[in-house]
Image (cartoon, grey):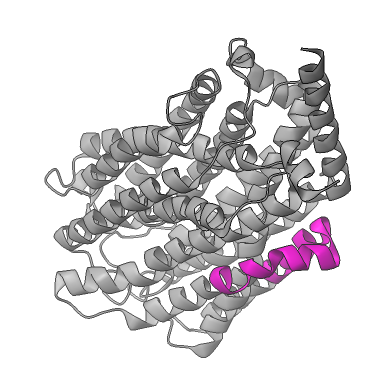
Amino acid sequence: MSEKGQETQGFYKLSWFNRIGYGLGDTAQNLVYQVVVGYAAFYYTDVYLVGGDKTKSAGITATILMVARIIDVIWDPFVGAFIDKRNPRFGKYRSYLIYGGLPLVLGCILLFYDGFRTSIAYAAITYIVLQMLYTIVNVPYGALNASMTRDTHEITVLTSTRMVCANIGGFFVWTLIPIFIGLAAGKGIPWDFVLFQFVGSIPGILFMPFVPAIKKLIGKKNMFYVFGVIAIIGNAMIYIVSKAGIESGDNVWMRVANFVKSTGFTIITGYMWAIVPEVISYAEYTTGRRIAGIVNALTGMFFKAGNALGGAIPGLVLQLIGYVAGEAEESTLSKDPKAWFKVLLIYNLVGLVLLVICFFASKERVVMEDKETENVRISDLWKEFVRNGPLRVIALYFITAFTCMTTQNSSNSYLFGMSKQSPTTQEGIRWLAAIIPIIFNIIMIIIIYFYSLTDEKIDEINKEIENRNHKVDDLA
C-alpha cells in the first residue's frame, strides 16, 4: 500500500514540527508539575516548615501528599469520562492544554507562595487543588499521541521525541533549579549536588533518540529487561559509594553511579508511554470505541497512585528514622522561601508558553466520532480494566514505576548534606535513594514479562480497525 493510502487509513506520518511541538507539552509539564513531584517533600519539611514543628513536619508532609493523591485518583475517572464525552471547538484533547494550562500554572504559583508559611491548611488545599488541575491537562495530553496516528513506528518516534523534551524539562528541574534558587537567595550554589543531578539528566537527553533503533535491534521486552538491570546496577552503586562514607556529590564514583542508574531508568520509564496507545488500540479493537480519555485516565490513576506512594514513603520513613527538618546543610538546596517563589514563578510562566506551542503543533486525526461519545460512562473505566489484560499489566507497571521514580527523586534532596543526622537516619536515607528503588525495579521487570502485545500484533490490530471503519463508511 502507498504511503498516501496508509495515511487515509489512519497511519499518518508526522512532521518534526508535530513531534517536537507535542514533546514541548511534556517539557512544560515538567517545568510546572515535576518541580512539585520532586521537591514538594523537601520544600514542605525544610523550607515551608509545615506545621511549624521540625520534628513533625515530615509526617505532616507525608499525610498531605498521600491524601491529595488519593483524592486525585478518585478524580481521574471523572475527568477521563468528561473528556471522552465532549468535542470542544479547538480539539477533543488539545483544547485542555489551554483550558487547563492556565489554572494549572496559577495553582503551582500559589503552592509556592510563602505568605502563609507553616499553615497546614494552606499547604493541603493548594496541593490538592494542584493535583486536580494537573489531571485536567495530563489526561488529554496523554491521549493526544494516540489521536495523532496509528502508525506504531511513528508513535515510537513521537514518544522518543516527547521523552527527550521531557528530560530537557527534567534537566531544568533537577540540575538548574538548585543553581537558580541559590542565585535568587544570594547564597552559594551547591555545585556538588548540581553536578550529581546533572549527570543524572544527561541519559534522558542523550539516549532517548536511540530508543527506536534499540527496540528494533533487541525487541521491546528485552529493552525493558536490559535497561531495568542497568538501573538496578546504578542504584546498587549509589548505595555502596554512599555507604563508604561519601556524603556529597563531589566524588566521581557517585556521579558515575547516578549516570548508570539514570541511563537504565530513563529508558524503561520513558518508553512505557509508547505502550499506552497500543492498549488504546486494543480496547478499540475489542469494543469498537476509541476511548483514549478513559484509558489515559486509568493509567493516570495508577501513575498518580505511584506518585502518592512515592511521595509519602520518604516522609513516613524519615519520620520513623528520626529525621530532623531544617538540619539539611546548605550544600543541597537553599531554604529561602522567597527565592523558591521567584524561581518557580518564572518556570511556570515559561511552562504556560510551551503548552500554547504544543496546542498549535498537535494535530488530532484519530478520535471517536461524535455519535460514539454519547455512550461513554465513568463505569467504562472499570469495565475496561477488568476485561483488558494488557491494560492491567500497564496499570501495574505505571504504579510501580512512579512509586520508584518519586521515591528516589524525592530522596536525592536528603542524600547529600546529611552529616548532622544520626547514623540510623543516614542509613534510612540510603535505603530511600537506592535499596527501595532496586526492589521496585525488580518488580517492574517481572510485571512487563506478562505484557502480551507485540509490535506485529498491534500493527495487525490497527489495520483491522481501519478496515472495519472503511467498510462501515462504504455501507453508509
- Using residue 119 as the reference point, say whether residue 383 is left or right of it: right
Q: Nearer the viewer, residue 138 or 186?
A: 138
For the question of whether residue 390 can be seen, the reply is yes
- Using residue 169 as the reference point, say whether residue 143 is left or right of it: right
For the question of whether residue 235 can be seen, the reply is no
Residue 215 painted magenta: yes
Outermost residue toward the left in this view: 115
The residue at 34%/38% (across/down) is 130
Q: Is residue 428 above or below residue 22?
A: below
The residue at 52%/78% (across/down) is 242
Residue 309 point in image, percent of width and height: 52, 44
Q: Nearer the viewer, residue 24 or 121?
A: 24
| Magenta stretch: dominant secondary structure | helix
Residue 12 point in image, percent of width and height: 68, 45
Residue 387 painted magenta: no
Number of dots carrying numbers: 0
Would you identify the image quadrant in which residue 326 lies? bottom left
Rendered-image quadrant of the C terminus: top right
Magenta span: 203-231
Residue 6 point in image, percent of width and height: 78, 43
Q: Nearer the viewer, residue 32 or 281?
A: 281
The residue at 22%/59% (across/down) is 340
Residue 429 point in image, percent of width and height: 47, 64
Q: Is residue 286 above or below residue 95?
A: above
